[in-house]
């Protein structure tokens, strides 16, 4: 699996989600993201890490 960091649009497309949802989850600290760019304002995501975080969130949501 490729470990390259991706932008939110690419991650959203691969997961079938809206780009805004990816940003919202990252801002809430629910999925990992990395600051990039000259002023560290851009966000990049590792798809494998995002998938794992979402899997964990889903498992927590179904626990009684």
Image (spheres, rainbow, N blue to C red):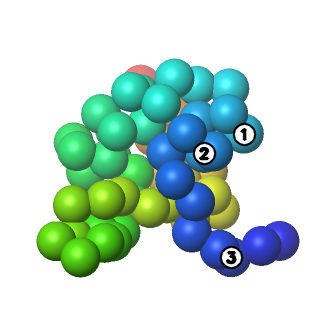
Quadrant the N terminus occupies: bottom right
Element on which disc 2 rests? helix
Disc on the earlier residue, 2 or 3? 3
Residue identified by numbered label 2: 11
Q: In whole angstroms, how far apart are the C-alphas of marks 3 and 1?
A: 14 Å
Q: In whole angstroms, how far apart are the C-alphas of marks 2 and 3?
A: 13 Å
Give the residue displayed 57% in from the left and 69% down from the top.
5
Looking at the image, residue 12 sits to the left or right of residue 63; the answer is right
Give the residue displayed 72% in from the left and 39% down from the top.
14
Looking at the image, residue 55 sits to the left or right of residue 64; the answer is right
Confirm or deny contact between disc 1 and disc 2 (CB under 8 A).
Answer: yes
Element on which disc 1 rests? helix
- Where residue 55 appears, as percent x and y from the top left, is 58, 44
Residue 61 sits in which quadrant? Answer: top left
Give the residue displayed 30% in from the left and 33% down from the top.
24
Quadrant the C terminus occupies: top left
Foreground residue among 41 and 28? 41
Residue identified by numbered label 3: 3
Residue identified by numbered label 1: 14
Q: In whole angstroms, how far apart are the C-alphas of marks 1 and 2?
A: 5 Å
């Amino acid at each position: 699996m490729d470990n390259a960091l991706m932008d939110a649009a690419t991650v959203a497309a691969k997961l079938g989600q809206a780009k805004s949802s990816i940003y919202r989850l990252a801002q809430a600290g629910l999925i990992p993201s990395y600051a990039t760019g000259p002023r560290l304002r851009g966000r990049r995501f590792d798809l494998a890490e995002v998938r794992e975080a979402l899997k964990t969130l889903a498992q927590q949501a179904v626990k009684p």
